Amino acid sequence: MMRQLKKLLLLVVLPLLILLFSLLVGSSQNIGFVELCQRIGSEVGGYLGHPTAVLKDNMDTILWQVRLPRILLTFMVGAALASSGGILQAIFRNPIVDPFTLGISSGSAFGAALAMLFPLLPVNISAFLFGVCAVGLTYFVSNAGLKTSIIGMVLAGMVISGVFTAMLTLLQYISDPYKLQAIVQWTMGNLHTASWSKVQHAFLPITIGLAILILFRWKLNLLALGDQEAIAVGVNPKLLKLGFIAVATLITASAVAAVGVISLFGLIVPHISRMIFGPNNNIVVWANISIGGTFLLLIDDFSRAVMPFEIPIGVFTMIIGAPLFIYLMRRNEINWNS
C-alpha cells in the first residue's frame, strides 16, 4: 500500500503541483495561488459555455499565451529526453549511454541548424532526418561483418557525434550574424521562444513515440537480460533494438527541433528513476516520463525566476547535471543493477 502511494505521489501528484507552481512564477510578474485558481476557473467556465465576470488583462496573456505553452513544451521535452536515455541504456545495457552517444542529438542539431540557415525543409523534419542519418551511420560504421558489438556501436556513435558537431560549428562559421545568434542560442537549449505552434509541432511525434514505448516497455526487460535470454523466449533482439532506437530517434529529434540541445539530461534522469523505483522497466518508463518532465520544469523555473535575465536551460542542465552525475558515481549508484 505504501509503495503504491509513493508511486502515485511521485509520478502523478508531484508533477501536477510543479505545473501549478510553474504557472505562479516568472521573470516578469508573479501571481498568487488563489488568483490563479480563479483564473483557471474562469477559463474552464468559458470553454464550458459559462463565462464569468472576470475581466481579461495582461496577466491572462502571460499565463495562457506565454507560461502555459512553455510549461507544456518543457514537460514534453524533459519526458522525451529522459525516456530516450532510458531506452538506450536498457537496450545497450550500458549506464552511461544517452541520446548523444549514438549521435542522435548531434545529428538532429545539425539538421535543425541547416534548416535555419537554408530553409528548404521545416526544422523538425530536417532534425528528424539527420537524426536518423546519424543513427544509420553509427550502425554502419560499427557493423563488423555479421555482428555488431555494443562497445563498437557506442564508440562509433561518439565519432559520428563529433563529425556532426564539427559540421554544426562550420555552419555557425559561415552564417550571417543574425542567424548565428539564433543558432548559438538554440544549441544551448532555448525555451524562451516556446509557443503554442511549437507545442503543436512537438506534441504528435513525442506522444506517438512515448505511447509506443509504454505499450512495449516490458520488452525492455528482456533486452536488459541479454540477447540469448530474449531469443529463448521467442523475441528477435536485433529487430527489437532497431525498433526502440527508431523510437528514441523520433522523440529525441522532435525535442531537439523544438528547443535545441539540452546536455546530460538524458543521461542523468534514468539513473534517478532507477534509484527510486529499481531496474524494472515496467515502472521506470513511467518514472522517466514523469521525473524527466518535472525535473526539467524545475530547472526552467529556476532559470526564469532567480536571474533578472534568462540563462539558456542547457547551461543549467550541465551545471546541475555534472555534479549530480559525479555524486552518483561516488555513491556507486551508476550500476545497472541499482
Image: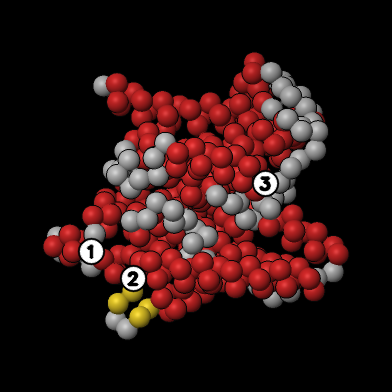
Q: Is residue 229 left or right of residue 311?
A: left
Residue 152, percent from left and from top? 40, 71
Q: Residue furthest bottom?
A: 145
Tag 2, which secondary structure? Answer: loop
Q: Is residue 266 left or right of residue 68?
A: left
Q: Amino acid at mark 1?
A: Asp
Tag 1, which secondary structure? Answer: helix
Task: Name the mark nearer the viewer: 2 or 1.
Answer: 2
Say above or below: 55 vs 200.
Answer: above
Q: Residues within 10 Å of mark 2 (few under 14, many from 20)?
A: few
Q: Which residue is mark 2?
A: 149
Residue at horizontal 44%, vertical 56%?
Answer: 97
Residue 1, percent from left and from top? 26, 21
Q: Residue furthest left?
A: 232
Say above or below: 13 vs 92.
Answer: above
Question: Does label 3 or label 2 sit earlier along the sequence?
Answer: 2
Question: Does label 2 or label 1 sit earlier along the sequence?
Answer: 2
Q: Amino acid at mark 3?
A: Val
As rendered, which of 283 and 329 lies closer to the eye? 329
Q: Which residue is mark 3?
A: 315
Q: Residues within 10 Å of mark 3 (few under 14, many from 20)?
A: some
Q: CA distance from mark 3 to mark 2?
A: 33 Å
* Picture quadrant where residue 66 is located: top right
- The circle drawn on residue 227 is 1
Residue 27, percent from left and from top? 76, 32
Q: Amino acid at mark 2?
A: Ser
Say above or below: 45 vs 324.
Answer: above
Say above or below: 243 vs 218.
Answer: below
Q: Residues within 10 Å of mark 1 (few under 14, many from 20)?
A: some
Whether label 2 touches label 1, CB < 8 Å: no
